[in-house]
Amino acid sequence: MSGSDADFAAALTAALGAGQVLEGSAVAERNPGFGASNLRAGILVRPRDTAGVAATLRLCHEAGRAVVAQGGLTGLAGGATTGPGDVILSLERLDRIEAIDPVNRTMTVGAGCHLQVVQEAAEAAGLMFPLDLPSRGSCTVGGNIATNAGGCRVFRYGMTRGLVLGLEAVLADGTVLSSLNRVIKNNAGYDLKQLFIGTEGTLGIVTRAVLRLFELPRGQATALAAVESFEQVASLLKAVDGGLGGALSTFEVMWRNYYAVTAEATCGASMPLPAKAPFVVLIEALDRSDEAARGALEGALGQAFEAGLLADAVVAKSAAESEVFWRIRDDSLVLFDRHETVLPFDISLPIPEMADYVTTVEATLARTLPDYATYTFGHIADGNLHFAVCGRAMDPATRETAERAVYAPLDGRGSVSAEHGIGLDKKGWLPLSRNPEELALMRRLKVALDPKNILNPGKVVDAA
Amino acid sequence: MSGSDADFAAALTAALGAGQVLEGSAVAERNPGFGASNLRAGILVRPRDTAGVAATLRLCHEAGRAVVAQGGLTGLAGGATTGPGDVILSLERLDRIEAIDPVNRTMTVGAGCHLQVVQEAAEAAGLMFPLDLPSRGSCTVGGNIATNAGGCRVFRYGMTRGLVLGLEAVLADGTVLSSLNRVIKNNAGYDLKQLFIGTEGTLGIVTRAVLRLFELPRGQATALAAVESFEQVASLLKAVDGGLGGALSTFEVMWRNYYAVTAEATCGASMPLPAKAPFVVLIEALDRSDEAARGALEGALGQAFEAGLLADAVVAKSAAESEVFWRIRDDSLVLFDRHETVLPFDISLPIPEMADYVTTVEATLARTLPDYATYTFGHIADGNLHFAVCGRAMDPATRETAERAVYAPLDGRGSVSAEHGIGLDKKGWLPLSRNPEELALMRRLKVALDPKNILNPGKVVDAA
């Protein structure tokens, strides 16, 4: 560690008090989460409160030190990557649920609170926080906000952006911006919280948030449907969405290559549907009772069958069976068991363009990377597709070949990141999804909010 | 008209072509909409396309001319007010519906398109654009976006902000920012459209937008419920929202003073419920069929009655009766028939604080303005309350007395504008709802995006 790191750590300790600043090996030995390079910084600060975050940023701003905010370290775009000169600002101690208001249907939480803790606290109050991700037990609300996290129920309940009513953030110079709005409608001037949602810690660091909660759904029904063509998948979405009258909460599409593997891993030979159809769709209704949800779902699927939109369908007869259906969709971890490398993608484009796009990407991957397997699935209702390109360890050139196959056909018509964010890993591909005027305006915002370029520098977009 | 106005108009005409620039009396003689001072500018430009908007802004930027964008002129906060030196930029000719995609469930429209035209085009495609306001026939999509318009179905479908997937805007210097995203999930860098939604034409001028559409609901049920206390109103909201399982689309509360007047105006002596209870609630369910909506609504109201949450309720037996219920809620125009002046307010605060707040405001108004009548109603589920203070013509001191009565008790806990915006009229009250750090950050954004302060200058927030 350089002398200046030790001096700066001492200055931080003097400002924050003992036990809040880690150095050198004490940083490197922590759990790096999903990114091996998350802990390369010489200093890690874990303040007890917003004032500690503000003091840290004030000192970093004065010294021109780069600050990387970290939450649960489950990001998939390299947004939390650090280098030797950086200061990690961990929000782990801002993990309190400060208030739940069951009448206003809001929760005020610290940024370091785990998503699952928020979900469970809401449920205990008869309410639901609808954001849900496989990493719920590790990811934090602050990270969800910084990356505008999505998941499987977005088309009904919105991205994280739509679930945050207010927030508190600390600006680059240590100014505390308290904007803890608690109402759905507030047009009192610019909606400043938008600056900190989905900007991956590059414009400010979120310390607290007011989350919107919903009444806990009283009934659920789940089904799997086998579909023969993507056009029918798109028509089925419209049919069940209209037929369920607002109760549709999930419409997850698995291409056969994905379903075959995860259904077999979950169910062995007794899959709910055989892995024959080109598409299997997981459909969930959340409604006023199990009976209402199930009746509506069976009715909508029956009509869709009569209209020739699906080849077969099975509705879960119990909560346990519903869990099995969900596990088939969620269990992409099985890919890690079978392959040395799993390269995940996360793109979006309009639904009518998906079928051709996937055909193009799968064909290119089969041609250029014949030794790798591709699995395809996605949140179709949101325009969001995932690919997992899997096989032996990848060198950088192989990785770029895969990236080019997925991203190049998006040029000008889709997004290289639907929900994971840009971070460091996708920065080079961002110009495929954003034009020069958009990139210039992003840089203008970055300079306006972080003129010394200390907040997660080099991530998302370069300063001007 | 000054010579420089004529010169500048000539320069605009040279750049844009004939017929797109009006001067002097040709401006003043137009329909001023809701604001008598909307047409005080010497020049009005009505470009045919985005290129014309860009050319106008380039010239105004060079000349340091103030530009006020105008849509349907139905704003309620003075956001479209102009003075003699201003250039009005009317988006009226950008009124085309460019595309409707029924599979992707999106519509691409020009900013000058009327809201009602959008609603009807969506419906003709079997879809719904859920934003709805009484001024639907006059207001424009561009104005809806610039003010982040709300309305009666926000808690289910979101504000305008949540219904805009992408947009095209022209920046102060004439740069065209094309950000016409068509998917629900897109985390490719900063979400720049947020800069132009709800910022009232002060950061850029919206020219086109991609709107999110929903499947057209197949069934509707409507009810009125009489409730004895505000605590019961709040409990009733939770009860019917949970009991309807996602189908609740409207929960509008009328205080007795409002219901008594509008129900009598609509129904005479044969009101659906007598004007006796302190609160009457309009409840709407949009669901998969009329039978499902009606069954669920009757079930939820029955349970609420048994739980002692309501004194009486009536469910509409026909579409015509449902329309009557809606007219009782919507027909605030009757206040204009009865009073020389109607001063509307539009505040928001958390639901648990509403009852005390309204009691305080009504008591203050009764004491300080005994010759004026107050009517109270609101979108409770959104935290949004309206007051109408009515009586003879108001001098500025009287108006300020009314404003102080409504706004002062919000200090630090509520918003002086839930949905109408700040414009010019509420700018002086903004510091009650936003702290100095928030106001400073708004100014910083303003300077970054409009360094010459030509975009709707003086509205919302002053440049630094």
Image (tube, coloured by chain):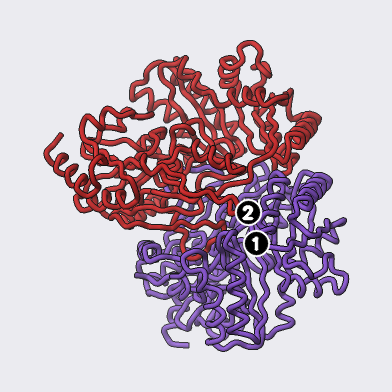
Chain colours: A red, B purple
In the rendering, at what x and y percent does residue A83 appear? 25, 36
Q: Which mark is residue B379?
A: 1
In the image, taking residue A175 as reference, residue B412 lies left or right, namely right
* Residue depicted at x 74% and y 76%: B334
Q: Which residue is nearer to you in this view: A110 or B98? A: A110
- Looking at the rendered structure, the kind of residue marked 1 is His
Chain identifier of the residue bearing label 1 in the image: B
In the rendering, at what x and y percent does residue A138 appear? 44, 32
Q: Which residue is nearer to you in this view: B211 or A109? A: A109
Above-or-below relation of A153 to B238: above
| Furthest-top residue in this view | A269
Can residue B394 be seen from the camera position used here?
Answer: yes
Q: Are marks 2 and 1 in contact (CB under 8 Å)?
A: yes
Residue linked to disc 2? B155
Tell me the distance, in whole angstroms, between the alpha carbons under discs 2 and 1: 9 Å
In the rendering, at what x and y percent does residue A105 appear? 58, 50
Above-or-below relation of B120 to A98: below
Residue B435, by quadrant, is bottom left
In the rendering, at what x and y percent does residue A112 appear? 40, 41
- Looking at the rendered structure, the kind of residue marked 2 is Phe
Can residue A162 be seen from the camera position used here?
Answer: no
